[in-house]
Image (cartoon, coloured by chain):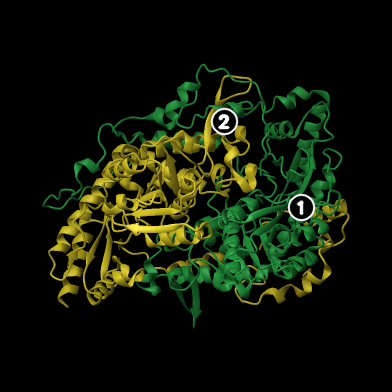
Amino acid sequence: MIHTIFDKAAPGRNAISFPVGMPDEPVDMDIPEALLRDRSDELGVPDVPEIEIVRHYMSLSCENYGIDNGIYPLGSCTMKYNPKINEALAALPGFRDIHPLQGLQDEQSCQGILQVLHEMGLMLADLTGMDAFTLQPAAGAHGEFTGQLIIKNYMVQNGLDKQKNKIIVPDTSHGTNPASAAQAKFEVIEIKSDKSTGLVDLEQLRQALAPGDVAGIMLTNPNTLGLFEEEILEITRLVHESGGLCYYDGANLNGLCGICLPGDMGFDIVHVNLHKTFSTPHGGGGPGSGPVGVKDFLKNLLPGPRIEESDGMYTMVLPEQGGFGSIKAFHGNVGVILRAYCYMKALGLEGLRQSTKSAVLNANYLKAELKDTICVPYASRCYHEFVGSDDCFPNGVNTEDIAKRLLDLGVHAPTIYFPILVHGAIMIEPTETESRARLDGLVDAFKQVRAEAEADPDVVKNAPSTMSVHRLDQVMAARAPVLNAKDLESLLGSAAKPGNPVENEE
Amino acid sequence: MDYIPHTAEDIDYMMQETGVHILLDLFDTVPPEILIDDAAAATILTSGTLPAQGMTEPELRSHLARLAGKNKVYRSIFRGAGSYWHYIPAVVDYLASRGEFWTSYTPYQAERSQGYLQAIFEYQSLIAGLTGMKFSNASLHDGATALVDAIVMAQSQVRNRSTVVFAGVVNPMYMTAVATALRPRDLAFKQVEASDVEAQLDGGDVLAVVVCSPDFFGIVHDVAAIVQAVKNKDPNVLVIQCITEALSLALLKSPGAAGVDIVVGEAQSFGIPMFFGGPALGFMAVADPKLLHKLPGRIVGATKELHGDRIGFTLTLTAREQHIRREKALSNICSNEALNMLRAAIHIVALGATGLKQAATLSVRRAHYLKQRLATIGGFSVASDNPTFNEFVVTTTPATARLVQQACEEHDVLGPLDLGIFNPGWAGMLLFCVTEMNTMASIDGIVAICSEAAQA
């Protein structure tokens, strides 16, 4: 039986209490009783002794897996090593314990952090070929949405928003792309990739552009198959010719960082995932940071505060006083930006280029070593990642089975069933920080799964068998959702239902 | 420097296996006119900020220490406005920095991620308890984006209406974020006094009423009365409560008990450092199962093994999400604020119900003490008779307000926020914030600062 933190309750034995220092003359709260919680409205928070809190979360951590544990080849997620010095430096009190509005009283009180933010925007501009950045977006998808708002507002400014209301998204795009465009109230046109090359089909692109109602295109390059869009200059030319803007989804920047600039490819707007390319920890799903950069002609449409430098003095201009609004409170995920700043300063351009080369070398090496074990439908040069398939696996062993069995063998599974274009996709991104020995270990794990699939497929189909739980019933989870510890008991005695759903994951 | 583990021999061997002679050959499908070769690399460094060669770890440490030293860490902080100075127990940093959590990603592979999934499940349960609602998600970016998402959700539920009414003073940074993000939706936003909400519903165009409580001025509104008035007049209108100081949940009537449909807010107060404003933690919870299927973000559910009886946890209801529904999804969120969610969960249980109530009570009583003392100073007046939580507004002249700021600075105190920065009509209005971190001595100190400023 699962033991939750609620099972460890010991009323009155809570870990933390505070020094009491009431005024000499007692002051009553001026809040009427009717506005306070009462007995029927309990907090639902347990008091737990500190040692039990520590043991609880320590045991939970042991049932989790991070890059610190081993290889994490999750395609399109860039799970590279997170340098520990960056944690130590971001945690300095001079960064961690400063209030976001203290510069409004006295800019002298936050010159250090303003310098970090100012330089960060410029470093990103150098590496993307853009002219200006906002650091405000909190994650990649939040950056995408910001980029779509910029396109929307550009069209409004030019009186074209009614006419140009569509965004082109290739079928290889991340699921966030069409969702972000829709959030900005664009209609999404999905264009199919060329089946033989895995690249944007120029004929389809021309047809989509022909009616003249396209506001822009969202593209990631290298694309999610790990392939460079070789016709990129023609693609961006065609979109510009039709009056649209070109948006670069920086999710895959680790395949090109410092080697080729999105600005040179013809893009007007770029977002960068600092938690991918620039090594900040993924944290189990955030916090990330998704700065957005633009070419000069779009500069005035950037949301968020603006940081200006003059004679070594930094000042911050709040968005209300001149920018184009704001997409969250305050100035961005500064704690994350700091870690990325440390990483970029530590590597310099030389280190960033070397990392990119190594990331691409690792992916190509893995592809070469795995090509006889899993099918690799696109044999041409891959960049930071490549996509395999379960097509050649025997005895009905599918991608999900392979992923689950890899867990048993001590590595994390790749991204599975994405991109949708490839049947039973297995999307592998090793990153540059995995050694040859680790890559060979992953290859061995795949080979073992392949051998088992031939000799003893049930071992693979019933995987995982070494985790704290066997394969879970996803249908049951969604059909009768149990989302609160209070309702866990309802699961006791309920029979597991047959069924083995497969969901696309990214 | 870099973090590449390969030896020169490894690289040679791997290049041989991949069939390239030099590493740059790996980029042979990039058009040559946009490929930056090694000789030309330095030409992209136009801003002078990214070094050609990186720093060593010792150099980096001293560079960052110097920058951190140029930021002032105040002895005492009387400023909130959406980012709060609270005590963070040592166990929060200790446990949340475990690499198994910190260096993992979204728990897509449930069986290998039971630890994080259970932590999210428990967080959802804690938020449900604190808000008095049934269902919580696994986090959103911050309070402002959570409010944006709540309005999007309300619009999808209450169709063919286009007005959102805001009762209570909205944090201006939240209002800017809402206006910016929702501009393509052609919605009308009306900010009204809490007592005027009912009258706004006459035209039948209102899709949601957003009640900020405690609001930007710290005022605690009678949310239950507003809900009742709204629902009596037009039961289709959804009521959203927005909370920027999550600690208020420990004392004030819960949103669930008040009958609101959606509660959103900022939970930075739960174990998350201020960090100059981010990363933070947006929370969202709903009461009605119908709204559960419209919740944005990750949701974790409990289930059983396919062929066994053990209980486990998994991401669920994913059919709502962008990676399945693409452009038809109600939200595009992917990476959220998971690690801050974990910090919040640990913080909440480290304080426990007892500690949360104590921290909230201390904050409010000290805030009320300060408010009463300031009210006795000539030239200062308390802006409102309404009950307040741990923030409140005191009005003085803009000149006196400036003197207060200067004197605070001299005493190493981050003083109240002069609201004139957001609205010229608010010049001379000082927003004070008090938490369990502000000692009685520091409170008496700021009273003295204000007295002196008033007499100057």
> What percent of the width, then of the height, locates residue A226?
76, 52
Q: Where residue A400 sits: x, y (%)? A: 71, 33
Among the 4 quarters of the image, the one containing residue B353: top left
Q: Which chain is yellow?
A: B
10 Å crowding of disc 1: few (<14), some (14-19), many (20+): many
Q: Nearer the viewer, mark 2 or mark 1?
A: 2
- Label 2 sits on residue: A478
Q: Is residue A372 left or right of residue A267?
A: right
In the image, is A63 to the left or to the right of B40? Answer: left
Are the numbered discs 2 and 1 placed on the same chain, yes or no?
A: yes
Q: Which residue is mark 1?
A: A226
Frontmost residue, B288 versus A364: B288
Q: Amino acid at mark 2?
A: Ala
- SS at badge 2: helix
Residue at the extreme front of the image, as rendered: B203
Name which quarter of the figure residue A47 lies in. top left
Question: Disc 1 is attached to a residue of which chain?
Answer: A
Q: Quadrant of the N terminus of chain B?
A: bottom right
Determine the residue positioned at 28% across, 31% down.
Answer: A40
Chain on which label 2 sits: A
The circle drawn on residue B373 is: none
Can see residue A191? yes
Q: Secondary structure at mark 1?
A: loop
Q: Residue at x 58, y 50 (%)?
A: B332
Total residue callouts? 2
Output the letter for the chain in green: A
